[in-house]
Amino acid sequence: MTVQSDQLLAYALGQLDPVETAQMEAALQADPALQAELQQHLDALATLLDELDLSTVEVPADAEERLLARVRAEGAAPSLQTETASSAPAAGPAPLESGSNALPVRKKAWWIPAGLSLAAALALAFFLRPAEDPVSRYARLPGAVAQPIGTPEEQLGTIVRLTDGRVYVHLKRPPADGRTYQLWQIKDGQPASLGVFSGDGLLTEGLPQGVTLAVSVEPLGGSPQPTTQPLFAQRV
């Protein structure tokens, strides 16, 4: 995995989704230099907090509630621990030192190494930034290829193929109440369900190059076979 500096910074801030987080942690485990670069980002963020003046920032009325929900979500995230056959489990997270080959225990998130106050300050500093839409998040991954869904007159959404064969499908409009989108893989003329989704889109498992995908509107929970005319059928 080739890691860009902005991706590493997003990881330090807890901005990556679970899939991207797992990929980043695997890259960190294998690359001490990447660990050192991450520590540099954390040090820079700590310095930024010392210089940041949030007294003039107009905070939305529900910012505190949303921030607490985000911190709780970080607290519920599974921890990543590294162990060797000859060593006992570590009693707690160890600080990351430049040149070290050991990845410290990931407890809650990398962006809380200095405690909850740092987490809250960082989250508040970036809380008012517009959230990145999921299409852009997947499309900016190295090697990702995005293509529009629909016709030149009407774009229904976007398909993003990742280098590992996974495909992200997103439609611009959510389905009507009581309905859901269902993604199908068309193989030998027969549809096979890949799952249902709504406004958040759907990320598939790895699919072969040139596969044909289609989306239909179905009752909640999906259908064994399409019950409506597909909105599109497109090779990816």
Image (cartoon, grey):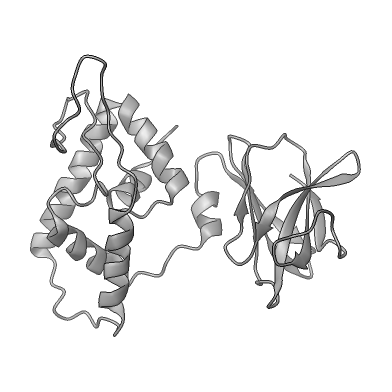
Residue at (75%, 68%) from the top-left corner? 219
Horizontally, is 74 left or right of 118 in the view? right
Horizontally, is 200 left or right of 88 in the view? right
Picture coordinates of residue 185, whole percent (x, y): 78, 46
Picture coordinates of residue 97, whole percent (x, y): 13, 32
Decide: is 73 above or below 94: below
Q: Nearer the viewer, residue 82 or 9?
A: 82
Q: Nearer the viewer, residue 188 or 138?
A: 188
Quadrant into which the N terminus falls: top left
Residue at (16%, 58%) from the top-left corner? 116
Judged from this view, the residue extending furthest toward the right is 189
Decide: is 215 above or below 164: below
Residue at (84%, 58%) from the top-left corner? 226
Residue at (13%, 79%) from the top-left corner? 55
Decide: is 100 above or below 151: above
Q: Nearer the viewer, residue 165 or 74?
A: 74
Number of numbered callouts drawn: 0
Q: Quadrant of residue 74?
A: bottom left
Judged from this view, the residue extending furthest toward the top is 86
Picture coordinates of residue 41, whole percent (x, y): 22, 46
Judged from this view, the residue extending furthest toward the left is 50
Q: Quadrant of residue 199?
A: bottom right
Quadrant into which the C terminus falls: top right
